[in-house]
Amino acid sequence: MEINEFLQKIKNKAAQNKLNRTDIRFTKTIALLKAKGLLRTNQPITARTGARVELRDAIWAGRNVEPRILEVLPAALLHYRANFIGLENIPPKLEEVLKAIRNNAELGPNFEGIEYAKMKSWANAPLRDKRTKPVNEKKQKKTFGFQLKTINKLQELVASGRFKDQTSAIEAAIEKL
């Protein structure tokens, strides 16, 4: 391959990349990910928290324009599922990644050349949206469907001073099992 040929290929690729950065599929995806705090960009793209993005468009943008999109895509799907359209056509490999992250697995499959560990770290990163919890944080049930007589008994135990609260009474009963 001649040097002029090589330089022409680079120029063509740069022109295509510039064109791809103006594509609506890329701009919508990056606007959503920027708004959610998953990606930063120096491009003049307005963040859009309520954007609804086709999953196939987000994958296209990650493949053709910005590979970091593929790195944060599993985290975005786990935390902001409602912002994505076309989830019934999710690629099987991406579904495996999501399943491994949900199960907090140490090892998992790569997706489109992106290592599992990188994708998992984004799913476990704290986000600006305080309503959204990292995947690796344990979820705790806060309410139980007790019968009224059980609730009354718990309140009596707390009122008697044997326990500081209803939770400690339940935990003590479980410890005795």
Image (cartoon, rainbow, N blue to C red):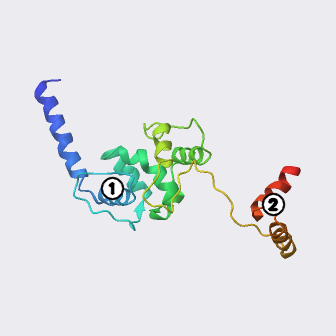
Circle 1 SS class = helix
Viewer-proximal residue among 114 and 41: 41
What amino acid is found at the position of numbered circle 1 in the picture? Ile
> Which disc, if any, is residue 131?
none
Q: Is residue 9 left or right of residue 92?
A: left
Query: Residue 63: image x %, image y %?
Result: 36, 45
- Residue at x 83% of width, y 61% of height: 162
Q: Residues within 10 Å of mark 1 (few under 14, many from 20)?
A: many
Residue that mark 1 sits on = 30
Query: Is 143 located above or below residue 139 in the figure?
Result: below
Query: Is 23 located above or below residue 69 in the figure?
Result: below
Circle 2 SS class = helix
Residue that mark 2 sits on = 169
Q: Contact, CB < 8 Å: mark 2 with mark 1? A: no
Q: Select label 2 or label 1 by which is in front.
A: 2
What count of labels does the image hold?
2
Query: Residue 60: image x %, image y %?
Result: 37, 50
Query: Residue 82: image x %, image y %?
Result: 49, 65
Q: Quadrant of residue 26?
A: bottom left
Viewer-proximal residue among 128 and 74: 128
Query: Residue 57: image x %, image y %?
Result: 38, 56
Measured Cα–Cα span from mark 2 to mark 1? 50 Å
- Residue at x 45% of width, y 64% of height: 83
- Residue at x 54% of width, y 59% of height: 88
Which residue is the extreme one toward the front?
A: 161
Q: Is residue 163 left or right of residue 58?
A: right
Instruction: Decide which of tag 2 and tag 1 comes sooner along the chain.
Output: 1
Quadrant assignment for the N terminus = top left
Viewer-proximal residue among 72 and 121: 121
Q: Quadrant of residue 153?
A: bottom right
What amino acid is found at the position of numbered circle 2 in the picture? Ala
Q: Residues within 10 Å of mark 2 (few under 14, many from 20)?
A: some
